[in-house]
Image (cartoon, rainbow, N blue to C red):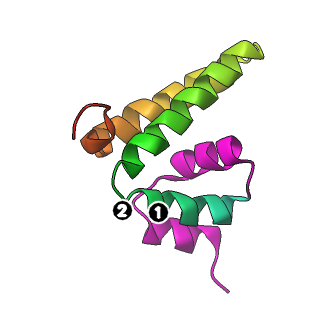
Amino acid sequence: MISLDDIEDMTCLTRAEIDAIAEHEHEPELAAALHGEYLMHVHKGPQLVQQMICEDIRAALQRDDPERARALFATLRQFIADHPEAVRGSL
């Protein structure tokens, strides 16, 4: 059986990025991995992933969860470092 680790290895996303997509889209991690991988290969898809992570950060701050906001900010920084095309206006 294919595990989430196997799926993660087949995507260009990290586990933290997959978790952020799952949190944002309210979907299981497997579906989020597939959704995220799809987005990374469509026009402006990386920017949508970046936007999801930013919205998750705002949501964590609004519910007074600074630990989650910090973790998501670290995820965002790594995502942008790995995928500079995700920066808005880069197209």
Q: Nearer the viewer, residue 79 or 43?
A: 43
User: Marks 1 and 2: CB-CB under 8 Å?
Assistant: yes
Counting from the top left corner in percent of width and height, residue 42 is at 37, 60
Is 89 displayed left or right of 23 in the figure? Answer: left
Q: Which residues are magenta?
A: 1-27
Determine whether 15 is above or below 1 in the image. above
**Numbered circle sitting on residue 22:** none
Calculate the distance from the C-alpha at mark 1 to the C-alpha at mark 2: 7 Å
Furthest toward the bottom, the residue is 1
Quarter assignment of residue 31: bottom right
The image shows residue 7, relative to residue 69, as above or below, that is: below
Examine the rendered structure and indicate whether residue 89 appears above or below residue 84.
above
Question: Residue 72 versus residue 44: which sits nearer the camera?
Answer: 44
Dot 1 lies on which element?
A: helix
Location of the N terminus (image quadrant): bottom right
Q: Residue at x 68, y 59 (%)?
A: 29
Q: Position of residue 61 (x, y in %)?
A: 67, 15
Foreground residue among 71 and 58? 58
Question: Is 15 included in the stretch rendered in magenta?
Answer: yes
Q: Judging from the image, what secondary structure is the residue with disc 2 in?
A: loop
Q: Residue 19: percent from the left, percent from the top?
A: 62, 48
Residue sitting at x 21%, y 41%: 91
Label 1 sits on what residue type?
Glu
Chief SS of the magenta region? helix
Kind of residue sitting beneath label 2: His
Q: Which mark is residue 41?
A: 2
Res 40 visible: yes
Q: Residue furthest right?
A: 63
Instruction: Give the residue pinned by disc 1.
Output: 37
